Image (cartoon, rainbow, N blue to C red):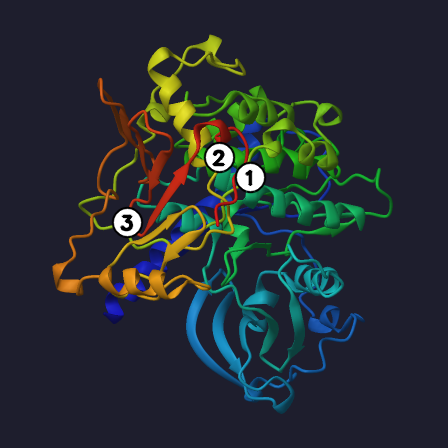
Amino acid sequence: MLAQTRDRDRERERERERDRLRFDGRTHSSASTPALANQLNAMALAPSASSSTQALARSTPPGDPRFSTRIEDYELGSIIGRGGFAIVHQAVSKHPASYGHEVAIKIIDKAVMNQSNLSERVATELQIHSTLSHPSILHLYTHFQSHTHVYLVTELCTNGELYRYIQRRQNGPYLSEAEARGVMEEIVKGVLYLHSNGIIHRDLKLANVLITRDYHVKIADFGLAVKLNNPEGEQKTMCGTPNYISPEIVSRQPYGLSSDLWSLGCMLVTILTGKPPFDSQAVKSTLDKVSRVEYYLPDSISNEARDLIGRLLMKDPKKRLTLRDILSHRWFSFPRLALKPERPVSNSTETRQHEQYHQPASHDQQHVHKTPSPAGKISNHVESLQQVIPQQQQRYPTQNNSAGVQSGSKNIRNGLPPSGSTPQDRQIHQEQQPLPPSEINTFSTLRLKPTQRKSKQGIICILADGYIFVDFNLKNLILISGDSTLVSFVHPNLMHFPVHLT
């Protein structure tokens, strides 16, 4: 078990090192893309600074007084993150003012930090992060240091990185557009807060977005963030992640707040397809694609999403949508679905259902709004229906393996009669008590591929996220969740706007 854990940690570290890049922080006049790729492959660190830890003594706002500034006042748990010079522990506060509060503690080794000339960068990270307070920003409770280590105490996001959450999805490493809308809205609002304070994040990517216990998202990792003197200010320090950096950074031109907008476009593509838009086997190839703005989108992406992506991945920074324009874009006018717990994917079922994404498209397919094929019209029709299930609907507990059925204003849940029921209702309910778990045959579509069948009797579809859509030409359409725990009846006339079923 320990060996498997070490192997998993090493693989995660290799993945991070491959994905992440740092420059030496010096101002560069011009350089070719191959030279830039060489520096990326060398993984040079940025920005450079004195190895003295005196930089960490910069004045920062006082931390939350409820949390101690002594490591002895925390009970360290398992390691939940690991980087080049730091590890992150899950921990519990033992301080009287915050006793029992779960936190995450980032522990930075000063010796490694000084050898890598990262003292200045850590000081900047503390100075910026300690001033931030927003629902979409990871909260830094306090920070302190000893002779050997620097400690950052933050809120705990129990569901980990957005990147890993998506990779664990059973139906493929991507989110539906309804789910992506909720995630992107929270991320954009967080970036809007940063930009309103003159802060460029400079390393926006799915690995730097964390998911809380209740499945909201938080922007984290401000190691490359910088505060501008004015909103029109520019930077020349070369840093970021190859799959997410903007063309102006690749070409070593001065850049400003709009470089984060490009990263948002790359994040949206990754969320919807499971793969960054400019990803390739070699860094140089990735940077060439970024410079040419060469990317492809699968046919499953809606026209509205294509338009938003195209307006963010503009080579000219001045032509990119502003953050407020992003939130008012038509794509955000459609319904949203909240993220939900995902069970691990077994080796036998770990398949990608967006294989068409890996098939090269013709040049004409770039940045073109596709007209859905006749075969895809039912899928688009079904997706619009699926999105009307409101976020307020909660999945029924399945401890007894019985499906919670919801119809109109009455529901049967956990073996209890509906509230406000009459004696006659209660008598009927007693006759309809759920069968024992051993006698119930639940079903699951999670291992089945999306499909659709049409006959004289009606239409039945299995959607990409496992939902079953049934239309028997009756008064109501039927939606059944992939694990059979939720059944919804929707009137056909209500399918084009959100419906709140009670």
N-terminal of the pair, mark 2 or mark 3, is 2
The reply to whether the C-beta atoms of the residues labelled 2 and 1 are less than 8 Å apart is yes
Q: Going by the image, does 100 lie left or right of 479?
A: right
Crowding near the residue tagged with mark 1, few <14, some 14–19, many ≥20 C-alpha atoms within 10 Å:
many
Q: Amino acid at mark 3?
A: Asp
Give the residue number, with chain letter if any, for mark 2.
177
Crowding near the residue tagged with mark 2, few <14, some 14–19, many ≥20 C-alpha atoms within 10 Å:
many
Give the residue number, with chain letter if any, for mark 1.
181
Spatial CA span between label 3 and label 1: 24 Å
Q: Amino acid at mark 1?
A: Arg
Give how far across and how far down residue 206 sits, in percent.
51, 46
Q: Mark 3 or mark 1: which is in front? A: 3
Under circle 1, the secondary element is helix
Give the residue number, with chain letter if any, for mark 3.
483
Name the residue at the left extreme. Answer: 439
- Residue 340 appearing in the image: no
What's the mark number on residue 106? none
At horizontal 46% and vertical 42% (from top left) the residue drawn is 389
Q: Nearer the viewer, residue 145 or 66?
A: 66
